Amino acid sequence: MFEKLKHFFDTHIALIDNKDDIEERLKVASAALFMEMMHMDSTCEGNKRLLILDMLETAFSLSEHQASSLIEIAEHQRERATDYFEFTHLICDAFSHGQKIQLIESLWKIALLDERLDIDEEYLVDKVARLLFIPHIEVLQAKNRIKEAHST
């Protein structure tokens, strides 16, 4: 089992460390932020993980296995990260404004899955939005869109 994990991380972390592979690094950065949101509130953690898996499959056209692998890599990166800037600076440089809004909406989806918003979850969205230079009014609009879609 240990050898299998070691091989997995050696293979995938090598991809991430390659500076030329920005797309892989962006996937990991996005997934790491999603995983951070999942860990903000332990309520519905299993359901939140399934939502993240689905969002990654859809956003990056991944198979379930690829999305699961991405989650494992992102979780490892999240655990070793010292701040959110490590992830957001990549996203800020590469994503369009629309893609950044989609990321914020995804964070709201994860946070609101259990139908209650924890202060730590709100803090994370606000912090990420500030690091991505998203105006607060757009963060609130994204939140309202997700709440509205969730209630229908």
Image (tube, rainbow, N blue to C red):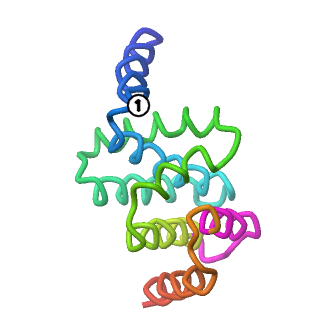
Image position of 132 with respect to 8: above or below: below
Asked whether, in this view, residue 38 is left or right of residue 29, the answer is: right
Q: Quadrant of residue 58?
A: bottom left
Residue tagged by mark 1? 16
Image position of 90 with respect to 41: above or below: above
- Which of 18/15 is in front? 18
Q: Position of residue 92 (x, y in %)?
A: 49, 58
- Mark 1: few, some, or many residues within 10 Å (few <14, many ≥20)? some
Residue drawn at x 44%, y 43% as measured from the top left: 28
Residue drawn at x 46%, y 73% as measured from the top left: 101
| Residue found at the far right of this picture | 119
> Is label 1 in a helix, a strand or a loop?
helix
Q: Position of residue 86 (x, y in %)?
A: 59, 44
Q: Is residue 70 in the magenta section?
A: no
Q: Position of residue 22 (x, y in %)?
A: 36, 41
Q: Quadrant of residue 16?
A: top left
So how many labels did they put on this image? 1
Residue drawn at x 55%, y 35% as measured from the top left: 77
Name the dominant secondary structure of the magenta segment.
helix
Kindly identify the amino acid type of the residue bearing the numbered disc 1: Ile
Asked whether, in this view, residue 16 is left or right of residue 114, the answer is: left
Residue stretch in magenta: 114-129
Q: Quadrant of the C terminus?
A: bottom left
Q: Quadrant of the N terminus?
A: top left
